[in-house]
Image (cartoon, coloured by chain):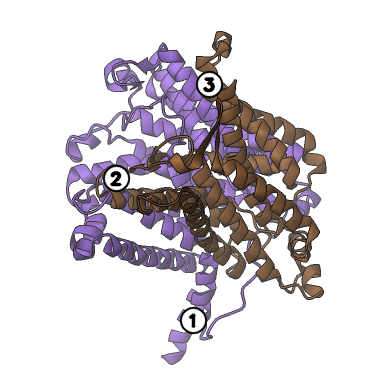
Chain colours: A brown, B purple
Amino acid sequence: MFLLLKYTLLYTVVLMMVALGGMFSERSGIINIALEGIMVIGGLAGVIAIKLMPAGANMLVIVLGSVAVAALAGMIYAALLAFASINLNADQTIGGTALNMLATALAMVIAKGFNGSASAKLDYSNRAFIYDFGELTVSAFLFIGIVILIVSYIMLYKTRIGLRLRSCGEHPQAAASVGIDVYKMRYLGVLISGALGGIGGMAYIVPSVSSWNFEVGVSGAGFLALAVMIFGQWKPFKIFLAAMFFALFKSLANIASSTALASLGWTQNMYNMIPFIASMVILAFTSKKSRAPKAEGVPYDKGSR
Amino acid sequence: MENKKASLRSRLAEHEGFLSVLASLICIVIGLALGLVVLAIINAEHALVDGLWVIISSGLKSPRNMGTVLANAAPLIMTGLSVGFAFKTGLFNIGAAGQYTLGAFGALYCAIVLQWPWYLCLLASMVFGAVWGAIPGIFKAYLNINEVISAIMFNWIGLYMVNDIMYGGGQGAMYDMASTKTYSLRKVAKQAMIPSCGMSDVFGKLQSVTIAIFIAIFFAIVIYILINKTTFGYELKACGFNKHAAQYAGINDKRNIILSMTIAGALAGMGAGLFYLSTVAEWNPQVSTALPAMGFNGISVALLACSNPIGTIFSSLFVSYITVGGTKLSTQYYTKEIADVITAIIIYLCAFSLLFRNKIRGLLAGKGGVNLGKGGNG
């Protein structure tokens, strides 16, 4: 039971953070399909940051320092998407797909270069990120995630910037007509998604294991987060609930063979499949009243009405 | 004289095909240049001779290498056609990887379990891929769910499902305990291997070089004719340009969306058929963390070819060529993924090839640049 709770919390935080990132980007009008790639780059940067920390460093310094590096790396990588889709009006889905492909290849080249060997596997210590409360183990990212959820909500709905950002995703020309800089707002949306995606990638890799082979990237977690975002209808707290739902099944896949559930005879693959099937079913039922930002995916054209 | 030159220039500036090829070539050159930068960052001393030169020359070095390029290009052409065909009809088929997975299942099941001959196995791979392509099409047509999202979901559903059936807890009928992959067709299902017709003798006795490459080229031509010379192709394209206008003209847009995705799925599924029935490799059902790269590389080659079916043949050969070049890099200095980095950079650049095209047109027409048209599909 504690194991299930532990994994569920772990995945909830990851999926929620990345999905919130996707939400900021899409609410500003940019489809961010590159989340998968951003997670890989963020995770890689975070892991390397941990490895480069001096041996006797303070736990808090390690956590905050490496998370900051992951966020920064994610932002830099997301800036590539922002540049292509905001400045050059490129197709956002294609740009994002290219960045996903680039991320895995780049991560392997960097990881192998860092290792100086033919293996893309990095070993690191994750002790600073894990805390034990009795039998329950939680990671530092749980606290970071809660803070991010609350800040996201306040920022999106209670501040001027949030209102401006949302307006750019619904009707950028109308937003521009009242003096909002659409380019700036969209950049902001994509960069926030880069930061959250980067942290999310690190949260996916670091707390659960102490070595990671970058050959597998983040094995579809970024795409899962996209599904979570849609499932959560682009709203922070709904995204949180959606993330819990997805995380529960992902955890069941991990522990099924070692608990009473084994008697059901379901394989790991079946549990892995369920969130995807569930989100397709939900999408089918909710598509008619979808809350997707109206202008997402459409390059901003000043002259169009 | 002066006049003639100017008219040739303006004619070239109006020629879409010429502009597309030039734009793609620019993407490739910049991509290779940036690749050289990456090589130099990793190991500056060896970047040119042991790095870039190996990547761009190895593919032609021996008949065996050429054979490897061809064997990998054939399935790549099919997935590229799949993505490109969908693009032409206004859909983004990111689901090629999933359709490819199902196609692999269809081909291997019919080959190993049913012991069918190769052409029927190939047909099965098409049918399986087509079904997996049709599903996102149906979701798009009747429920208006973005095909990108549903295709991503069905990619993973397909991968988990296929792996589960193939592995079957280690007892799967196609699963070879000894190699931890599916059974090698060379041992258990010789009748299902695509005939080589002497190809493998030409290319250094490499068994995986078969007539698959000709089948792929044949389909590229068929798709070219279908899109450009038939009423059906015109209807599909019309739906892609403007759904509402097409509806108004009496075209059944729902039917066409589903048909486009079905055809795209069939092409991707067949790509897997060509790959596995040529025995280039066996399927490993224990890898559930990554979708087959062939599907995503299909997106690359389609973009590089601006979705043109004939162009896809050449872009597939190119991508396959530098990928093989990447594997020949000396591991002492570099890793083979450098080739993937170069390809990905090229694709990133392709995302704004429209910009390049307009710049070239502007230069040729004698102006510094022209205003961009409305990007994307609006």
Neighbours of disc 3 within 10 Å: few (<14), some (14-19), many (20+): some
Q: Position of residue B11 (x, y in %)?
A: 50, 76
Circle 2 marks a residue in which chain? Answer: B
Work out how far the residue at label 2 is from the one at label 3, CA to CA, in angstroms: 43 Å
Q: Work out whether disc 1 and disc 3 sit on a shared chain.
A: no
Disc 3 element? helix
Name, please, the residue furthest toward the bottom: B2
In the rendered view, tell whether residue B19 sits above or below residue B348. below
**Residue beneath disc 3:** A255
In the picture, measured across the screen, residue A86 lies left or right of residue A113, that is right
**Chain letter behind tag 3:** A
Q: Which comes sooner in the sequence, label 1 or label 2?
A: 2
Residue B313 visible in the shown view = no
Same chain shared by disc 2 and disc 3: no
Look at discs 1 and 3 and give the one toward the viewer.
3
Give neighbour class at mark 1: few <14, some 14-19, many 20+ (Cα, 10 Å): some
Quickly name the residue at label 2: B69
How far separated are the C-alphas under marks 1 and 2?
Answer: 36 Å
Residue type, mark 3 in image:
Ile
Q: Find residue A178 and report its horizontal and vertical position in percent.
A: 82, 74
> Mark 1 = which residue?
B363
Quick one: SS at disc 2? helix
